[in-house]
Amino acid sequence: MLKVNNIQVVYNNVIMVLKGISLEVADGQVVALLGANAAGKTTTLKTICGILRFQNGELSEGDIEFKGRSIATHDPDAIVRMGICLVPEGRRVFSDLNVVENLWIGAHTRRDRDGAKQDLDMVMEYFPNLRRRYKQQAVLLSGGEQQMLAIGRALMSRPKLLMLDEPSLGLAPMLVKEIFDILRRINSEQKTSILLVEQNALVALKFAQYGYIMEGGKMVLDGPSESLLENDDVKEFYLGVSDDQERKSYAGVKHYKRRKRWLS
Amino acid sequence: MTEGAIYFLQLVISGIAVGSLYALVALGFVLIYKATDIMNFAHGEAMMVGAFVCYALVVAGIPFLWAVLMTTVIAMFFGLATERLILRPMIGEPQFAVVMVTIGLSIFLRSVSGIIFGHDNKIFPSQLSEQTLVLKGLVLSYTHLWAMLISGLMVILFFLFFRFSRVGLAMRGVANDQDTAMLMGISVKRVFALTWGLSFAIAAVAGIFLANVMVLNIAICLVAIKAFPAVILGGLESIPGAIVGGLVIGVLETLVGGYLDQTMPGVKDLTAFVVLFLVLMIRPYGLFGKKEIERV
């Protein structure tokens, strides 16, 4: 469904952020994109949904295909119309608007008002909290509710591919679980493919079927989630567990570097 | 009622009439600032152009109300063209440069209008300006009445537009958070263009009625400078603020004019700026504005 081929992204004509990234999302698949801060995960998502060039970025090489068509030069509204919607990092709900208005803005690209109304009901069914807060200004919602609103807003565009940028950011573990349960339902009931960017590797890999790991603007590792969960390096650096009984000292930077075998 | 009370009420009512026009001017100004973050210093000129176009149409023999409608449409296209030709190429340039461009545009429009329509005073030949309405000793001209009515109507229309229409909602979204609006599939370019179109249309209506209340000449664009204190008073980004600000400035100005102008001639035109000064000292974010002040 989505194919990203060896893309390079440069900011301000100088800083190369993505140095040849490739990834693929199949129909109905859930894919996780993991990595530390500044690995280029968010940039990858921004490139796919086409707003990069409005933020001083430029796709200098490579191509992005969605359903067999190149979308690399499309405007963001055209990309939303084709069925890709991003839930941005930090939720970014429209703070001056109330909950329903936020959801209706999500349906901006749609012409079928009746279908959109049905989807509004569907979103309210997935997130009962939003129904309770129907007319409230979005800025007054709690962090978890704002995240739900942001996801619901994206669903209103009836996306075929839903991209989420760190939906667990700043939320309590209980809420994270709740949100991922709902995402799982959306994935199986609506057949929506999901591309998920996360810092919380354990949650993400348990949710996804396939995972990619990025570092410094490059893909360093990819594979089915189960095999990534078993990978010793992933365990040690992303999941924080290790088979060794002794405590690891991360002060030893050399040691840290030596263990990252995939980079060399 | 005593004579003093009647005089006072009379002043308040004329103040509301003039203030409702200031409010319209301020509304158009806020619309652009809120959606696109641009201070449009050519707003008064957009108003003036609207007034002149309507004047030309009326002189050509078109009935007044039809002329108003036609002018509104023309002004809308004028706004769209301004955005497309002058402001779109400035996207990504420093804000200072964009502001200078609007100032340049204002000078350009003023000069061109001077060449076409001349610099002398004109009386707007409408059917409205002659008659007056007398109610319990209060005198109200039909021009004032119409000004209030039309401004009220436009404010209600805009309220409905922003609250219930898909495009209005998109415009609020863009004003709130541009990047996220883009992510939701809103074409920000189109929203910007539409904002300029609407703003110019409102400006034209305000200009036409101002020209009816006062005389029509190039200097009418200076009224926009008075709308500026109204905008600041309301809080730069607030549409209800612009309306309240406009009304307050209008009433205060008329009151000051009515009571103090004999002893201190010219103090009337100062009122708005005294208010501006006080607001900036005491409550720089205005009545309805956000408390974040941009530091430059």
Image (spheres, coloured by chain):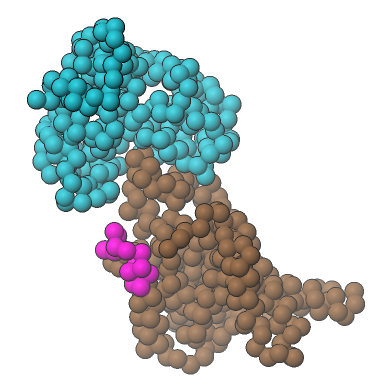
Chain colours: A cyan, B brown
x, y percent for residue B293: 51, 58
Tell me if residue B3 comes above or below residue A117 in the rendering.
below
Residue pictured at 53% horizontal, 27% vertical = A130
Quarter that holds the C terminus of chain A? top left
Q: Is residue A155 visible?
A: no
Residue pictured at 36% horizontal, 45% vertical = B179
x, y percent for residue A229: 25, 11
Tell me if residue B96 comes above or below residue B180 in the rendering.
below
Q: How many marks?
A: 0
Is B90 a magenta residue? Answer: yes
Query: Relative to the observer, which residue lies in front, B138 or A143?
Result: A143
Q: Is residue B160 left or right of residue A40?
A: right
Q: Quadrant of residue B40?
A: bottom left
Q: Where does the magenta region start and end?
A: B89-101
Q: Is residue B282 visible?
A: yes
Residue pictured at 51% horizontal, 80% vertical = B222
x, y percent for residue B247: 65, 67
Tell me if residue A4 comes above or below residue B263 in the rendering.
above
Q: Quadrant of residue B193?
A: bottom left
Is B280 a magenta residue? Answer: no
Q: Is residue A127 left or right of residue A210?
A: right
Residue pictured at 24% horizontal, 24% vertical = A252
By secondary structure, the bulk of the magenta-drawn segment is best described as helix
Query: Relative to the observer, which residue lies in front, B28 or B131?
Result: B28
